[in-house]
Amino acid sequence: MNGFLNLLKPPGMSSAAAVGFVKRLTGEKTGHAGTLDPEACGVLPVMVGKATRVLPYFEDKSKEYIAEICFTCATDTQDAQGTMTEPGRGMPEKEELLSAFRDFTGTILQRPPAYSAIKRDGQPLYALARKGVLVETEPRPTDIFGIELLDELGPDSARIRVRCGGGTYIRTLCHDIGQRTGHPAHMRLLIRTRSGCFRLEESRTPEEVQAAYEAGTLDTLLCPMDLPVRHLRAVQVAGKTLKQILNGVRQPGSLGRAADGEWIRLYAGDEWIALGHRMGETMELPLILTDQMDYLSRHAPGAE
């Protein structure tokens, strides 16, 4: 069983627990394509089987979130689960808030929170923080493509939409907007509505996944392995060329009439077998998804 499960992670479930849930049902190697905080909900792409090898070749690693920024106080975790560190001063004026959104749009430096999964000396920072050891992290560049004000929710909070690159901490963004406006804030709610090509409206709840497993139709919920790389041109191979690729033999750069530096998807019929990358006169094969023995066992005459 190979592919991507677009899981709608519920609040209260960690990303690791979500991956473990899928692993128990599929019996395959699994992983996630971008962690989501335990109290957040929304799109969590889970890689199943050979799909775990495709992640490094994703082109679109952007994310989209809907969040509630609450101006009642700032907290040590930068979300509603933390302890107040600074009382609020009410919500800023709308134009002041929109001005802060513009200030945080583009490539910015963001300091990851002390309560995060980043590791120091092998331990996640949140584990150290719970022991009273607060580690100051170094600022990191991150891309914020847009921040949109959706609703003002009473006197102390607002609902926003954030489009950003991978590795962005939305709770830190909410905290920093509070600091910029002089109105201390934290993140009260977070929903991931998109992760790359995976969208909320196409996601499946754990209950739906469990029901499909019990009905023996779990494989029908998996998105194809090549979904995240379909922006690349597809090239068919057969005969001697197919055999060589399955054996990991580099090919001439002219394969598929690829331009120098171009990445291509290589197929044998309907089956995606490899990624090719032309480097001068050679077609490199950085990702091969099957080998000759496995392929022949499934496609040779008389194979089951």
Image: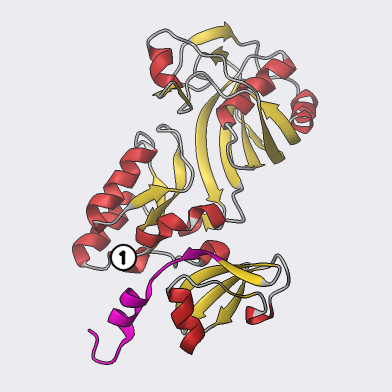
Q: Quadrant of residue 117?
A: top left
Please name the residue that numbered disc 1 is placed on: 1
The correct choice, above or below, for 4 with respect to 83 in the image is below
Quadrant of the image for the C terminus?
Answer: bottom left
- List x then y, in percent, for residue 56: 53, 52
Q: In this view of the protein, which residue sits in the foreground, 125 or 194?
A: 125
- List x then y, in percent, for residue 111: 62, 23
Q: In this view of the protein, which residue sits in the foreground, 100 or 293?
A: 293
The correct choice, above or below, for 1 with respect to 234 in the image is above
Q: Quadrant of residue 156?
A: top right
Q: In the image, is residue 164 part of the stretch drawn in magenta? A: no
Q: Is residue 230 visible?
A: no
Q: In this view of the protein, which residue sits in the foreground, 92 or 297?
A: 297
- List x then y, in percent, for residue 168: 60, 35
Is disc 1 surrounded by few (<14), some (14 to 19) or many (20+) residues within 10 Å? some
Q: Quadrant of residue 300?
A: bottom left
Q: In the visual, does 10 lie left or right of 215? A: right
Q: Is residue 207 visible?
A: yes
Which stretch did the figure color magenta?
Answer: 285-304
Q: How many numbered marks are there?
A: 1
Q: How is the image coloured?
A: secondary structure
What residue is drawn where x is 49% and y is 43%?
Answer: 34
Q: Residue furthest left?
A: 214
Helix, strand or loop at label 1? It is: loop
Quadrant of the image for the N terminus?
Answer: bottom left
Q: In the image, is residue 302 part of the stretch drawn in magenta? A: yes
What residue is drawn where x is 66% and y is 21%?
Answer: 176
Q: In the visual, does 262 lie left or right of 32? A: right
What residue is drawn where x is 54% and y is 50%?
Answer: 195
Which amino acid type is shown beneath numbered disc 1?
Met
The correct choice, above or below, for 99 with respect to 282 in the image is above
